[in-house]
Amino acid sequence: MSTTIQGATKGFSREAVDELSHRRQEPDWLRQKRIEAWEAFEQIPMPKRTDEEWRRTDLRLLPIDEVLPFADQADRLTSRADLPAAVAAEVEAAGEVSGVVVQRDSSIIYFEVDSALAEQGVVFSDLETAVREHPELLQKYFMSDATVPVTDNKFAALHGAFWTSTAFVLLRPAGRRGRSAIPGFLGSGSCRHRDVQPHPDRG
């Protein structure tokens, strides 16, 4: 279960944005969102120690031009038994849950969900699947003012251009109740995105 780091591109660039989107075979609307985020990143100045929220952080030694922006996608696992021992133990310790997502670097390597969630009006998936199956919701909410816009700050913009994956949760409509917990177990990696959206229009 190895993950090969993408070696052709070093440092963040518009070309790397295009390469990431191409490798993931993303639709045009999502590629355009990445491009808009990259353009915002280029326009927003780097934070300074004189900025209140950055006064305790010195970015001068951040090797941003040396970072590998994403990794090649790894193969998915089909069983909890195939998970790394430490991750499997963490999932097991959570007890009875409704869904599990495990991410390693740029890839979701394991995903499971209880079918009972759908009966409660909840959609739980990885973000790549949500892009394919719920494009109308993603286009409306993803990286928009309803969440955290890419223009919020320079690193939000960088994240918007190079996010890789995470869990996607579409909450059940108001008035419907459920008792299940939905934890996502994410391995260490770059530019992971969390997106949890209430959607009151569902019947």
Image (tube, helix red, strand yellow):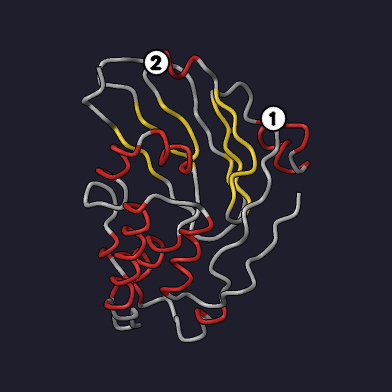
| Secondary structure of residue under mark 1 | helix
Q: Position of residue 161 (x, y in %)?
A: 40, 63
Q: Position of residue 5 (x, y in %)?
A: 66, 65
Rendered residue at 54%/60% (across/down) = 190
| Secondary structure of residue under mark 2 | loop
Spatial distance from mark 1 to mark 2, Cα to Cα?
A: 24 Å
User: In the rendered image of this protein, does residue 172 appear above or below residue 139?
Assistant: above
Q: Position of residue 23 (x, y in %)?
A: 53, 57
Work out whether residue 27 or residue 200 is closer to the camera in this orientation and state it. Answer: 27
Question: On the image, which quarter does residue 188 sit in?
Answer: bottom right
Residue sitting farthest toward the bottom? 60
Drawn side of residue 156 relative to residue 187, left or right: left
Q: Earlier in the sequence, mark 1 or mark 2?
A: 1
Q: Which residue is mark 1?
A: 92
Q: Which residue is mark 2?
A: 120
User: In the rendered image of this protein, does residue 137 appear above or below residue 17?
Assistant: above
Please name the amino acid that badge 1 sits on: Glu
Q: Determine whether label 1 and label 2 are within 8 Å by CB.
A: no
Q: Quadrant of the C terminus?
A: top left
The numbered dot on residue 80 is none
Work out whether residue 28 or residue 76 is closer to the camera in this orientation and state it. Answer: 28
Q: Position of residue 129 (x, y in %)?
A: 47, 38
User: In the rendered image of this protein, does residue 189 appear above or below residue 63?
Assistant: above
Question: On the image, which quarter does residue 71 sit in?
Answer: bottom right
Q: Nearer the viewer, mark 1 or mark 2?
A: 2
Question: On the image, which quarter does residue 37 sit in?
Answer: bottom left
